């Protein structure tokens, strides 16, 4: 039970502004989709759809690996893509595997998604040019710092005592 004399720790957050910023940027991409009449597409769908267009059908595991996400996350994304009729599944090389492939609808939307991807990358580059430091450099610096000492170890070092 929380101590009544301690404030709610979730009222302060170093990460929340970044999470909200990224969500707002994704919302702007979704707004673009809506303005262009591209329905049933979420920003997180762009990478797997573009990858499938360039590499052809692949298993959920292979798709997850090429996009550096977990199998579970990709499985959820593929389920959402199926609901929107952007992908379907076909038998794999053996009876135990299934491959995800683009449907005609999925293939039709890829050229727009590629244009949006390039435009978004340029918008990020333009944004970086407006600020005194590169966001990509901040990410590299954070990765290097975490390579020296993991985030897990940093959290543990800040926990008070041993709690169950």
Image (cartoon, rainbow, N blue to C red):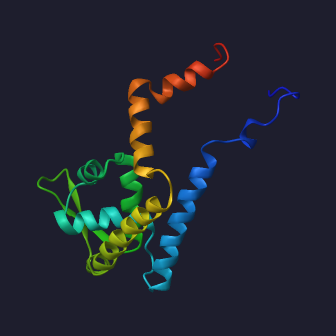
Q: Residue at x 43, y 73 (%)?
A: 41
Q: Nearer the viewer, residue 35 or 73?
A: 35
Q: Horizontal placement of 2 versus 80: left or right? A: right
Q: Residue at x 30, y 70 (%)?
A: 87
Where in the figure is residue 104, as x and y percent of width and height?
Answer: 26, 80
- Seen as rendered, the residue at the extreme right is 5
Q: Residue at x 47, y 63 (%)?
A: 127
Q: Is residue 160 above or below residue 145?
A: above
Q: Nearer the viewer, residue 4 or 91?
A: 4
Whether residue 96 is visible to the viewer of this picture, yes or no, is yes
Where in the figure is residue 68, as x and y percent of width and height?
Answer: 32, 47
Q: Quadrant of the C terminus?
A: top right
Q: Is residue 150 above or below residue 105?
A: above
Q: Quadrant of the N terminus?
A: top right
Q: Residue at x 44, y 27 (%)?
A: 150
Number of numbered tags placed on the structure image? 0
Q: Is residue 54 above or below residue 97?
A: below
Q: Nearer the viewer, residue 142 or 34?
A: 142
Where in the figure is residue 47, as x and y percent of width and height?
Answer: 33, 62
Whether residue 56 is visible to the viewer of this picture, yes or no, is no
Quadrant assignment, res 107: bottom left
Quadrant assignment, res 119: bottom left
Q: Is residue 70 above or below residue 99?
A: above
- Seen as rendered, the residue at the extreme left is 93
């Amino acid at each position: 039970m929380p101590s009544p004399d301690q404030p709610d720790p979730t009222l302060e957050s170093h990460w929340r502004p970044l999470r909200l910023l990224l969500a707002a940027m994704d919302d702007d991409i979704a707004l673009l989709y809506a303005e262009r009449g591209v329905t049933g597409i979420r920003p997180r769908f762009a990478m797997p759809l573009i990858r499938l267009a360039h590499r052809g059908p692949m298993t959920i595991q292979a798709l997850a690996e090429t996009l550096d996400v977990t199998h579970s996350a990709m499985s959820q994304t593929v389920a959402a893509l199926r609901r929107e009729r952007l992908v379907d599944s076909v038998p794999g090389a053996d009876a135990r595997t299934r491959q995800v492939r683009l449907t005609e609808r999925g293939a039709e939307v890829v050229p727009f998604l590629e244009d949006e991807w390039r435009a978004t990358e340029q918008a990020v580059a333009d944004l970086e040019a407006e600020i005194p430091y590169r966001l990509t450099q901040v990410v590299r610096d954070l990765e290097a710092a975490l390579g020296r000492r993991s985030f897990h170890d940093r959290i543990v070092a800040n926990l008070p005592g041993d709690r169950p």
